Amino acid sequence: MDMERGRMPDKDYRILQENYVYLIQNCQARYLIPHLHQLNLISTDNMVVLENEEESKGHEAGMKKLIEILNWSGYNALSGFITSLQRAGYTQALQNLQATGIDNNNDDHYQLLNKVMNDVKQLKENDLRKDKQIKKLQYEVELLKIKGKKLFSTI
């Protein structure tokens, strides 16, 4: 499949602009590059450029270059970026993007972002349930230890 070239829609780029400082300070291109490449949003040449930029000039420079390249990655660039953020574990960045794009629920990428955030929320809830189950089991183990000590002390 050929890569779609052309600018991302202005409204999508505005979302990246509004989150620009956060993204360049808190995300690293190296973790997003494989996902963006897999989604066919960046080429192999782009990968090399981004890796070299980050390696030679640092994380912020790498993210600046990534955002610049994304701007010319076509109509689906923001959706792919959102997916890449999710896969790379950038939950706070997703929340920031969601807060910026909250008025645009009709577009596919905003629906995707909301779905991703719901998935993240569900995972957190599952983790809390697991933590409670672990604590309950730990408590039961402690009770069994106490009962075992009492049993052996009476023998």
Image (tube, helix red, strand yellow):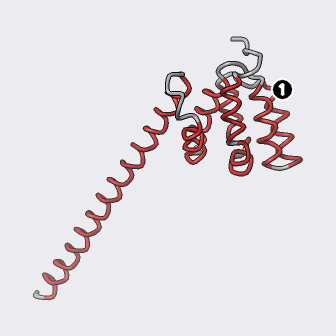
In the picture shown, does residue 46 fall above or below 7?
A: below
Percent across and percent down for residue 9 are 69, 21
Q: Position of residue 150 (x, y in %)?
A: 15, 84
Where residue 151 appears, as percent x and y from the top left, is 13, 81
Quadrant for the C terminus in the image: bottom left
Above or below 38: residue 23? below
Whether residue 36 sits left or right of residue 106 in the image: it is right
Count of numbered marks: 1
**Residue 6 higher or lower than 150, as above or below:** above
Of the pair 60 and 155, the residue shown nearer to us: 60
Q: Residue at x 20, y 72 (%)?
A: 144
Q: Is residue 21 above or below residue 85?
A: below
Residue at 39% across, 52% down:
127
Task: State the image quarter where residue 71 is shown.
Answer: top right
Task: Place residue 54 in its image quadrant.
Answer: top right
The x and y percentages for residue 81 are 64, 32
Residue at the limit of the structure toward the top, as seen here? 1
In which quadrant is the N terminus drawn?
Answer: top right
Helix, strand or loop at mark 1: helix
Residue at image position (76%, 35%) is 67
Residue at numbered disc 1 = 45
87 or 5: nearer the viewer = 5
Q: Amino acid at mark 1?
A: Asp
Is 34 displayed left or right of 122 in the figure?
A: right
Q: Which residue sits at x=26%, y=63%?
A: 137
* Identity of the residue furthest to the left in this view: 154
Q: Residues within 10 Å of mark 1 (few under 14, many from 20)?
A: few
